[in-house]
Amino acid sequence: MNKTGFIFDLDGVIVDTAKYHFMAWKKLANQLGIAFSETDNERFKGVSRKRCLEILLEMGNIKATQEEFDCWMIEKNEDYLNYIGTMNENEILPGVTVILVFLKEHNFPIALGSASKNAQTILEKVKLLSYFDLIVDGNNVSKAKPDPEVFLMAAKGLDVAPENCVVFEDAIAGIEAANNAGMMSVGIGDANILSSAHRNFKNFTEIDLEVIKEIASI
Ligand code: B16
Ligand code: MG
């Protein structure tokens, strides 16, 4: 039987980096005189850095020159990298490591499928990099979720057919991307929000190994 490939989103699935993204966007928003709340930050989850800045500037009705835009992108990322500077394995979301250890022990192909350009740095910081056979992130893709590009690239890299891949995602656009790729989508978070997912769990502690075995048909 063909092996199942497991693809993990990063922010909101493996670690909660959204709070650090929020701090960095909030700092820039304050500087530009734009009101920016945690609710506004929800719109930024799973969205590329460039698109996030475009949305922020639209919110503030600010027209930026290309030079300003590039400068604010760099500034936001430098602040973000500062905030995540002290991240360590204590920030891995509950239940994630147990699943990764199990998948690795059973030789399942594992990939990361994230919009972040800082994915590798974060996996290194939380000491999970060695679990991943492949990283597909914001540095590799040209089309953002809900386009299936990121997950199709991961399936190809893992040499697993899309229909044999399972995607763990916390964002609506990510679930749609997985569905568009013809993969099994597993929503991590609020089932009412992630209603288009094939399976839903609040977090990884709800996914016991029996569920993984069932999904992987072992
Ligand atoms: P960066 P994910 C996404 O990660 C975040 O959810 C989103 O808020 C962020 O803007 C995006 O990565 C880009 O991140 O600025 O580090 O390149 O959920 O796709 O893992
Ligand atoms: Mg996410």
Image (cartoon, helix red, strand yellow):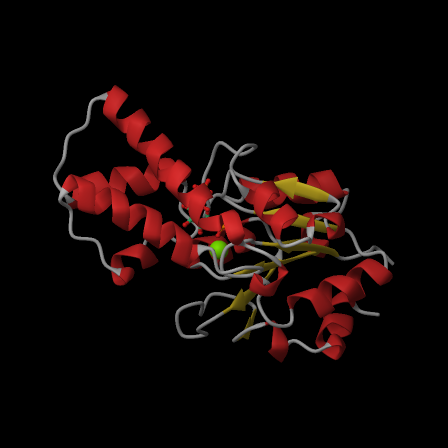
Q: Work out which quarter of the rendered image holds the N terminus and state it.
A: bottom right
Picture coordinates of residue 155, whole percent (x, y): 69, 45
Vertical placement of residue 83 versus 62, above or below: below
Q: What's the residue at 20%, 39% (across, down)?
A: 57
Q: Nearer the viewer, residue 100 or 182?
A: 100
Q: Which of 152 and 105 is in front in this view?
A: 105
Q: Which of 115 and 217 is in front in this view?
A: 115
In this rendering, position of residue 96 left or right of residue 67: right
The reply to whether residue 129 is in sight is yes
Picture coordinates of residue 17, whole percent (x, y): 47, 55
Q: Nearer the viewer, residue 92 or 204?
A: 92
Q: What's the residue at 53%, 66% (across, down)?
A: 187
Give the quadrant of residue 135. top right
Q: Work out which quarter of the rendered image holds the C terminus and state it.
A: bottom right
Give the quadrant of residue 121. top right
Give the quadrant of residue 96. bottom right
Count of numbered circles on the image: 0
Picture coordinates of residue 47, whole percent (x, y): 40, 46
Vertical placement of residue 167 versus 118, above or below: below
Vertical placement of residue 164 versus 194, above or below: above
Q: Which residue lies furthest to the front in this view?
A: 86
Q: What's the residue at 49%, 43% (across, down)?
A: 115
In this rendering, position of residue 194 left or right of residue 102: left
Picture coordinates of residue 188, whole percent (x, y): 53, 68
The reply to whether residue 44 is in sight is no
